[in-house]
Amino acid sequence: MKTIGLIGGMSWESSLEYYRIINELVKEKLGEPHSAKTIMYSVDFAEFENLQHQGNWNLLTEKMIKIAKKLEKAGADMVLICTNTMHKMAPEVQESINIPLIHITDAASDEIKKQSIKKVGLLGTNFTMEQDFYKGGLKDKHGIEVVVPNEEERKIIHNVIYKELISGIIKDESRKEFKKIIEKLKTRGAKGVVLGCTEIPLLIKDKDVDIPVFNTTELHAKKAVEKALE
């Protein structure tokens, strides 16, 4: 079994899900009492959140590269960035290490293509929904068209993520807002919805909507386990 390196803490609420899913999948595939070989570097998210909202992506990139190098030195055979937004600097991180970085959009697109879906809605932080690093990865590399909510809806989603979900606060009213937004994405042709923030699956489940939901946390963790057990 290969060792999975995890860059976590963004937030720890979703990193907890990564750890749980990875270990459950290894146990499912190999049987009791197997568990995954992992190394996690967990950051102080307050520091990273401040830099995100300041737009200081250069410093964030430097920090992510240092962490990835530490994981490689500690014996990781691959690296996962346990958050969608910080895949903004995934190319720079991959270039700085000699082990593979398992990209979250590759994991998501594999499942989207399995279901023969060509157009998806994308929910995430403003950074993920508005910038091209994520949408471009789905469209340019995998041929999947992406639609995002309007500006007002993006603000709602972003605020729920940063003011509620990263602190483990789950509100029914926020779930209702997200469901309304997904319904609007459906009217614009979305045949599935990508939960492009690793905290959103804490709020939105398959049962909440009537189109396929792509839980990026789960799909990313699943891809890592596949690689670890090859």
Image (cartoon, rainbow, N blue to C red):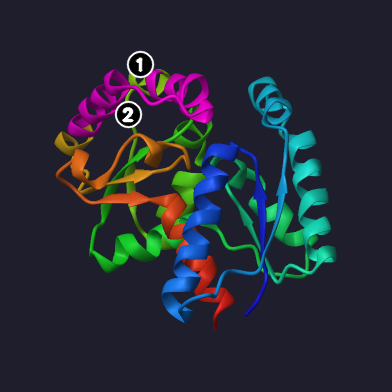
Where does the magenta region start and end? 156-184
Residue tagged by mark 2? Answer: 149
Q: Residue furthest bottom?
A: 230
Residue 37 located left or right of residue 132: right
Q: Amino acid type of disc 2?
A: Pro
Number of residues whose C-alpha sits closer than 10 Å to that of mark 2, classed few (under 14), some (14–19) or many (20 or more): many
Residue, disc 1: 152
Q: Residue at (33%, 51%) from the top-left corner?
A: 214
Amino acid type of the residue that numbered disc 1 sits on in the rendered structure: Glu
User: Under tag 1, what secondary structure?
Assistant: helix
Q: Is residue 85 visible?
A: yes
Q: What is the number of the mark on residue 121?
A: none
Crowding at label 1, few (<14), some or many (≥20) Cα neighbours within 10 Å? few
Above or below, comparing residue 21 to residue 223 in the picture: above
**Any magenta on residue 183?**
yes
Q: Secondary structure at mark 2?
A: loop
Q: Is residue 113 magenta?
A: no
Q: Could you tell me which quadrant the C terminus lies in?
A: bottom right
Q: Identify the residue at image location x=69%, y=22%.
A: 50
The number of discs equals 2
Give x and y (percent) for residue 149: 32, 29
Dividing the picture into quarters, in which one does residue 46 lie?
top right
Q: Dividing the image into 4 quarters, which one contains the N terminus?
A: bottom right
Residue 45 in percent (x, y) is at 67, 31
Question: Residue at coordinates 43% horizontally, 22% vertically from top-left?
Answer: 160
User: In this orientation, does residue 133 appear?
Assistant: no
Report the front residue among 36 and 48. 36
Q: CA distance from mark 2 to mark 1?
A: 8 Å
* In-image side of 1 versus 99 (left or right): left
Residues under numbered marks 2 and 1 in contact, where contact means CB atoms less than 8 Å apart: no
